[in-house]
Every structure is written in structure tokens, then in C-alpha cells.
């Protein structure tokens, strides 16, 4: 059934893929992360001097409010003295300036709980594998795993009061490795921002595809369509399709008894999930010969291209191993192009966030198309799946930013 649907899409998009193939002529056979391969790819990763200030960890969460990123929770299963799961949060804001030599970045983390600038969740709310989102100027964290129990509790962060308040539980199963995104939802008086939470896996390792909507007060699954495929550890991003000007949520990859290459998007107006073209070699044409991104535990973010159109980026993650592959998604043509691989240690379960740069740019810099108005950051993560207490693996606290429009620079 699915193969017929995919063949229809292949025919419909042949002209798009001809364009994609032309754009990918410098991007063939790029699975390796060696410097000689990276030099042929577009995109430049730069490591910051200031690391994430908390304990190294993986499977943390992040949300952004007022151009400030809040990063917290997560696990480090090599550190029994911290009981492995965390409840602390840290805030990052952009304080750099432009000059002719390029971008100057200061990671300006507000550390908690040392100086009280960002409140931690209660000790009882430690977890990893949670979801997080920002809605109506507040941050939300919920679900996950505390080392013994799968969770469904939810917490609201008020940045003005610097307080966490427990709210109504997630109405689905207690799960870890779910996903969350924010889109409008239809009301009698129009559309309003709404958070959607779903998928994940429960204590019996059953994968889920149910979704629930949260309006800032109440949960509902009335008229909320289920994801097409049950999975956990998927990646999600929200961007505007330039063809119709509508925002969609895109869910890619994940784990269902192994890594999957499923790719779907949610149309909040129709309340439907649509299959998109998978990142795998599924045709007789050349354009997808190097599509190799069946993965879980990746992180995703959205940046505008030089023409102001949105592009999504998917990086790190892996299957039975951690990886560094980075891919760019073009929603206009529904195709992917491989970019320079993430330059830090290979990892899964990192977090990413995007901050605006307009406040530190001059009018001349803003008018220069070579100066990005946004910057994407990737931090934390781990080298292996997070399993039981005392398990091995390496956990990270380094911070990197990515400019997809710069040529790769050899760091050796």
C-alpha cells in the first residue's frame, strides 16, 4: 500500500529531484566524517570556548523564550553520586557583536541553582527523555524517565517569577522519548497557538502514535490525529512551506525496533499527517543514492536561507551507533541535501536551539546577505543509548554553532 503512494510521489516530484541532483553534485558519498569529505560540503561548525555549565549529560530538553534558551534535565548514567537524572536548568542568551573579522560569541550562561537566576525543577522531578516547549511566554517540561519510573507529570516555568508549577498530567500513557511542537489550532473564534505532544514509548517498550493538544490550560485529544507510524526518539521541527505560506510540523526518523526512515508532516488545518519523501535510497535515480539517515536521537532546528526561505537541519543521532551526519531539508521541493557533518564527538540525544542576532547587528550588517540573522547551537549529548543506572558511554558539555552557508573550514 505504501509503495504505491511513494511511487506516485516519485513521479510528481521528478522535476524537483533533477534540481536537487544538480545541487548535490558536490555532495556524493559523504557518509565518512573525514576532513577530506567535509571539505566538499557546505556548512561550517565552530566550537565555543564556553561549555554548557552543568554536568555533562544526554537526553536533556530545551525551550526558547524571549530569545533566551533554557536547557535542563537529562541523564549521565556514569555518575551515581548525582543519581544520574537531573532537574537543573541553565539559560543562554546572545551577547556577541559583529565586526569585519566575523562573529564574536559569548555564551553568557546564567547558572542555576548557584546564583538562583534560573530555578531548578523540584528534586522529585528529575528525569531524562522528557519533552519541552514554549507557549504564550512560558516554558513547559513533562513526561520522561527518572531511572525507575516512566512519567506523565507536566511542569510550567514562569520566567518572570522564576518558578516552576506542576500542572495537569499528560493524558496519554506515561512515556519517555516523546516529541512536542507548537502550531495553531482551530477554535470557534479563529486559530491560537497550541502545543502538541505525542509518540514515545511506555514502560513495556510499546511505541506510541497518539497525540494530545495543550492550550496552556487544558489537554484534549479531540480532533487530534494520530501520527501515521508508532515510534519513539523521533525528531521534530516546525517550518513554513513557502509554496502555501502555512506552518507544518515535520517528524523524521525515530526508533521502532530499530532506526526508521519515516518522514511525515502534520497539517493543523486539515488535522492530517502526510507522508513525505524518506531519506533512503528508494528509487532507480541517482539523487537518493546517498540518502542514509535512518536514525533516532537526532536533533533538529530551522534557519532561513540567504533568500529568507526556511530550511530545516537534522544532525547527530544514529542507529546502533552515534553519528555526526547533518542534512538540510528544503520544504519547497521536499528534498534533502547533505551538509558538513557535526564536528564535535559523534553523539545522540543532543539539544539544539536558535537565537536571533538582530539586536547585535548594525543596519549595514542587517542589509548584508552574507550575514546570518540567526544562529543555531548544538550542545550536550552522549555516545550511546541511555539505558540503566551505571551504564557506560561518554557524555558531553561542549557547545557548537553552525552556519550552513559558510564553506567548511579545516580545523586541523
Image (cartoon, grey):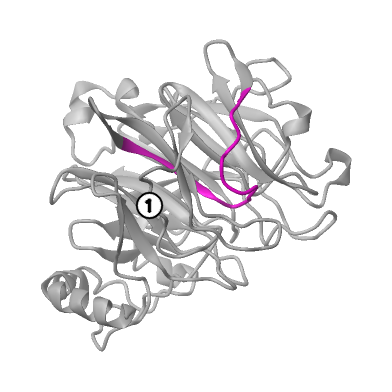
Query: Can residue 132 be seen here?
Result: yes
* 129 relative to 260, above or below: above
- Residue 128 screen position, x and y as percent: 67, 45
Residue receiving disc 1 = 225
Residue pictured at 48% horizontal, 74% vertical:
32
* Left or right of 67, for residue 24: left
Most foreground residue, 370 or 301: 301
Q: Which quarter of the rendering shows the N terminus? A: bottom left
Residue 264 horizontal/vertical position (percent): 35, 61
Q: Is residue 85 left or right of residue 172?
A: right
Picture coordinates of residue 406 (x, y %)?
31, 51
- Residue 239 counted in the magenta span: no
Considering depth in this image, is 213 or 8 the residue closer to the camera?
213
Q: Is residue 302 left or right of residue 93?
A: left
Q: Which residues are magenta?
A: 166-184
Under circle 1, the secondary element is loop
Residue 287 visible from this viewpoint: no
Residue occupying the far top of the picture: 161
Amino acid at each position: 500500500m505504501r509503495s504505491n503512494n511513494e511511487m506516485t510521489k516519485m513521479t510528481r516530484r521528478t522535476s524537483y529531484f533533477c534540481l536537487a541532483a544538480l545541487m548535490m553534485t558536490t555532495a556524493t558519498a559523504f557518509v565518512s566524517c573525514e576532513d577530506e569529505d567535509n571539505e566538499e560540503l557546505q556548512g561550517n561548525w565552530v566550537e565555543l570556548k564556553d561549555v554548557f555549565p552543568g554536568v555533562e549529560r544526554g537526553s536533556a530538553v530545551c525551550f526558547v523564550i524571549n530569545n533566551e534558551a533554557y536547557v535542563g534535565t537529562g541523564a549521565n548514567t556514569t555518575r551515581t553520586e548525582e543519581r544520574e537524572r537531573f532537574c537543573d536548568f541553565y539559560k543562554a542568551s546572545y551577547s556577541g557583536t559583529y565586526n569585519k573579522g566575523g562573529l564574536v560569541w559569548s555564551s553568557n550562561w546564567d547558572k542555576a541553582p548557584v546564583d538562583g537566576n534560573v530555578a531548578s525543577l523540584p528534586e522529585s522531578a528529575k528525569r531524562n527523555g522528557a519533552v519541552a516547549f514554549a507557549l504564550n511566554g512560558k516554558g513547559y517540561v513533562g513526561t520522561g524517565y527518572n531511572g525507575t519510573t516512566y512519567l506523565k507529570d507536566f511542569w510550567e516555568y514562569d520566567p518572570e517569577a522564576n518558578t516552576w508549577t506542576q500542572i495537569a498530567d499528560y493524558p496519554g500513557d506515561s512515556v519517555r522519548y516523546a516529541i512536542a511542537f507548537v502550531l495553531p489550532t482551530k477554535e470557534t473564534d479563529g486559530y491560537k497557538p497550541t502545543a502538541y505532544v505525542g509518540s514515545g514509548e511506555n514502560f513495556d517498550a510499546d511505541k506510541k502514535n497518539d497525540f494530545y493538544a495543550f492550550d496552556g490550560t487544558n489537554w484534549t485529544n479531540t480532533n487530534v490525529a494520530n501520527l501515521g507510524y508508532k515510534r519513539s526518539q523521533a525528531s521534530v521541527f516546525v517550518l513554513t512551506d513557502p509554496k502555501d505560506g502555512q506552518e507544518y510540523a515535520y517528524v523524521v526518523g525515530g526508533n521502532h525496533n530499530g532506526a526508521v526512515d519515516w518522514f511525515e508532516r502534520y497539517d493543523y488545518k486539515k488535522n492530517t499527517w502526510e507522508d513525505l519523501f524518506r531519506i533512503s535510497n528508494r528509487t532507480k535515480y541517482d539523487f537518493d543514492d546517498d540518502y542514509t539517515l535512518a536514525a533516532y536521537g537526532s536533533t533538529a532546528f530551522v534557519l532561513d536561507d540567504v533568500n529568507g526561505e526556511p530550511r530545516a537541519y537534522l544532525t547527530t543521532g544514529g542507529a546502533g551507533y552515534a553519528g555526526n551526519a547533518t542534512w538540510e531539508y528544503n520544504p519547497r521541493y521536499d528534498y534533502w541535501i547533505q551538509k558538513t557533518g557535526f564536528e564535535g564527538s559523534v553523539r545522540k540525544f543532543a539539544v539544539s536551539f536558535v537565537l536571533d542576532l538582530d539586536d547585535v547587528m548594525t543596519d549595514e550588517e542587517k542589509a548584508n546577505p552574507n550575514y546570518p540573522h540567526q544562529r543555531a547551537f548544538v550542545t550536550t549529548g552522549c555516545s550511546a543509548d541511555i539505558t540503566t543506572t551505571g551504564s557506560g558511554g561518554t557524555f558531553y558539555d561542549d557547545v557548537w554553532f553552525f552556519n550552513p552557508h559558510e564553506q567548511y573550514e579545516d580545523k586541523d
